[in-house]
Every structure is written in C-alpha cells, then in structure tokens.
Image (spheres, rainbow, N blue to C red):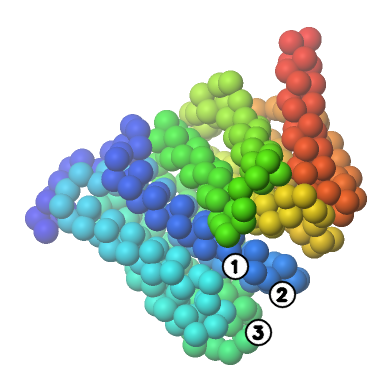
C-alpha cells in the first residue's frame, strides 16, 4: 500500500481510461434492470420507485466519475478498489428488480460498500484539495448510504421513504458543504459523461431485443424495431450534435476553477439525471411498443414513451443552459409537442414512434437553419 500513500501522481486524467470503460459496462446492466423495473410496473408507485432508485444509483455512479477525474486508476491498490466498487454496482444491479422486495437489504449493503470505497479512495489518493472537500462531503454521503442500507430492511412504503430521504440528502449535500476544492478536468469530465449517455442509449437498443423475445419475426416487427433504433439515434444526435462535446468541453474549461464544480454538478449531475431518466423511460416505452408491432398502446404506455422523450429534451435544455450552449427554444417547444403524440399511440404504436421521429427531425432541421441565419 506504499504506492497509495506516497505516489505523487494524483493529477486528473486527461482522457477516459480503459478501466473506466470496463467499469461503465456494469452500468449497461444496471440501466437494463431499471428499465425492466419500470416496464413491469407502470403505476404511479412504480414510477416513484424508479425515480428514487435511479437517483440513488446515479449519485454514486456520478461520484465515481468525479473520483476518476481526480484519481487516475494507475496503481494496483486503486485498481483493486475500483474492482470492489464494480462488484458493488453489479450486486446493486442484480438486486434492482426486487429491491423493493426481498433483495432490498442486498441493494442497501452493496450501496454502502460502494459509497465507503468511493469516500476512502478519494480521501486517501485525491490530493490535498479533493481530500479536504471529500472529508466534508463523506459524512453526508455515508449518512445517505446508511439510510439506503436501513431502508433495505424496512417494509413497504417505509423503504421508499428512507431511500427518498437519502436522495434528499444527496441533493442538498453540494450546497451544505462547498465543493469548490474539487478539481475538474474538463476533457475527462465531458468525455466520461458523454460515454454514460451513449451507454444508456445503447440500453434502449437492448430493450428492442428484449421486447422482441418470443415474438415471430415479420415485417411489422422489423419496422417497429427500426423505428425504435432511429429514435435512439436521434436522441444521440440531440445530445452530441456535430461538435457539441467539444463546445461543452470549452464551456466547462472557461468557467472559473472555483465555480467549476458547481457548474459541473448542475450540468452533469442534475441535468444528466434527467437525461438518463428520460432514456430509461423511452427504452421502457419502446420495449412495450415492440410487443404491439401492429397494434396500439395503452394510455400508460403511450404516456411513458412521450413523457420519456419530453424529460430527455427538457433535461438537455437544462444541461445546455448550465453551460451556456444555446439551442433552448426549439427543444423546449419540441418537449411540449411530444405529448401530442399520445393519441396516435392509442391508435397505433408505429404511428406514435413515427410521429416522435418526425418531431425530432423537424426540430433539428429548424435549429440548423436558425443557426445558419445567426
């Protein structure tokens, strides 16, 4: 462990490492499990559960993105702890479908381990500034993790309440203790979160395959599967555009270093939570639509598909506003118009998917023409 205590190399990594990419693969499974949880329960209770459990997971997943931004996984000790963290995330993912049932304590215990590893590695190897900032934040993180662990042993709505309280602490924590001492490397930070979005969008492609399981492959199934793929592609284009990743990196780099962490928490914390929640909702909606290739959706399923895309667009607007990237008006209008596609879904699932695709294409075309005039 000597390399942990004395290694001077605690500078933020310039680019995402292959170990981080390997770590992110666990998130593919996690997103799939959360989508399944939502697909199996489209009641208000089910939606509330997904909102809370996704918030809990993403707070700590984002925490690891901040961790590797400050602590390069370049020693055996650090890589071993990253493996422990990966194991914890995998256990959480396995427990997600029954997290509000018999596997709640497993989810809570795994989350506590993931949290403890994150805080410990940050304090030990994060450098003086990051270690000081984390020493202030760690008690709040561990308190929220303790609530998640406690909630895993509680029954019914008490579990949901305990986990919601944990989320409330996580949301408040950056404002209760200053986080300006965290050093943000813009290149690594933007790339890492962009990869998370790509991975989540990839999960929506997995949802197409999952929804098609056991269904006879015919022209109708192929058509609706291609429409689902096209919708995911356009969501990718909404976020990344032609050079939006580079613009985001420049914008974050242009923020005063003392304010950069707070801008990062708004743009890549809260806004990205909305982006990923929207992706999960759309994936669940597409999964339901695949099962109705030549039929209609229920009201809940049609609302899920439309509101998922609306949440995604509104969150993208919040993300861009935080970084001053523009492209706000047309996306806000498009977010509202997505809800107008619900009646189409009640008539024909293919019709609603087609309408959402047309809406996104029209939005992107109008945006491009507007940008040319300015």
Q: Is residue 172 visible?
A: no
* In front of the other: 222 or 230: 222
Q: Which mark, residue 157?
A: 3
Q: Could you say where residue 260 lies in the image, as x and y percent from the top left?
A: 51, 39
The residue labelled by disc 2 is: 45
At x 56% / y 45%, what residue is drawn? Answer: 205
* In front of the other: 120 or 46: 46
In 3D space, how far apart are the residues under numbered discs 1 and 2 (Cα atoms)? 11 Å
Q: Tell which circle, 3 or 2, labels the residue nearer the N-terminal end.
A: 2
At x 82% / y 42%, what residue is drawn? Answer: 351
At x 77% / y 59%, what residue is drawn? Answer: 301
**Relative to 128, residue 239 above or below:** above
Answer yes or no: do the residues labelled 3 and 2 have beta carbons within 8 Å?
no
> Is disc 2 surrounded by few (<14), some (14 to 19) or many (20+) residues within 10 Å?
few
The residue labelled by disc 1 is: 37
Q: Tell which circle, 3 or 1, labels the residue nearer the N-terminal end.
A: 1
**Relative to 361, residue 342 above or below:** below
- Mark 1 or mark 2: which is in front? 1
Q: Is residue 71 left or right of residue 284?
A: left
- Mark 3 or mark 1: which is in front? 1
Q: In this view, does 7 lie to the left or right of 91?
A: left
At x 68% / y 71%, what residue is drawn? Answer: 41
Q: Quadrant of the N terminus?
A: bottom left
> Is disc 3 surrounded by few (<14), some (14 to 19) or many (20+) residues within 10 Å?
few
């Amino acid at each position: 462990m000597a390399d942990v205590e004395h290694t001077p190399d605690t500078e933020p990594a310039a680019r995402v490492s292959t170990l981080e990419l390997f770590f992110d693969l666990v998130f593919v499974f996690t997103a799939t499990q959360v989508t399944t949880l939502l697909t199996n329960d489209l009641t208000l209770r089910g939606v509330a559960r997904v909102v809370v459990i996704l918030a809990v997971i993403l707070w700590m997943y984002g925490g690891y993105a901040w961790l590797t931004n400050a602590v390069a996984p370049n020693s055996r000790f650090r890589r071993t702890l990253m493996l422990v963290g990966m194991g914890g995330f995998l256990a959480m993912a396995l427990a997600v479908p029954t997290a509000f049932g018999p596997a709640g304590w497993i989810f809570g215990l795994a989350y506590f381990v993931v949290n403890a590893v994150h805080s410990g590695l940050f304090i030990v190897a994060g450098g003086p500034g990051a270690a000081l900032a984390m020493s202030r934040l760690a008690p709040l993180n561990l308190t929220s993790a303790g609530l998640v662990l406690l909630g895993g042993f509680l029954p019914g709505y008490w579990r949901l309440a305990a986990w919601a309280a944990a989320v409330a602490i996580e949301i408040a924590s950056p404002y209760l203790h200053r986080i300006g001492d965290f050093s943000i490397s813009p290149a690594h930070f933007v790339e890492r979160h962009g990869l998370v979005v790509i991975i989540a969008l990839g999960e929506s492609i997995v949802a197409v395959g999952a929804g098609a399981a056991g269904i006879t492959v015919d022209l109708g199934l192929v058509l609706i599967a291609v429409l689902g793929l096209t919708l995911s592609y356009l969501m990718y284009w909404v976020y990344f555009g032609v050079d939006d990743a580079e613009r985001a990196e420049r914008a974050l780099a242009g923020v005063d270093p003392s304010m950069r962490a707070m801008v990062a928490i708004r743009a890549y914390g809260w806004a990205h939570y909305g982006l990923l929640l929207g992706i999960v909702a759309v994936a669940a909606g597409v999964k339901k639509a695949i099962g109705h290739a030549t039929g209609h959706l229920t009201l809940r399923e049609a609302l899920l598909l439309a509101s998922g895309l609306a949440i995604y667009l509104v969150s993208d607007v919040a993300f861009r506003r935080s970084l001053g990237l523009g492209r706000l008006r047309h996306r806000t209008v498009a977010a509202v118009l997505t809800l107008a596609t619900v009646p189409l879904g009640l008539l024909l699932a293919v019709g609603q998917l087609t309408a959402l695709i047309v809406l996104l294409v029209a939005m992107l075309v109008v945006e491009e023409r507007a940008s040319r005039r300015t």
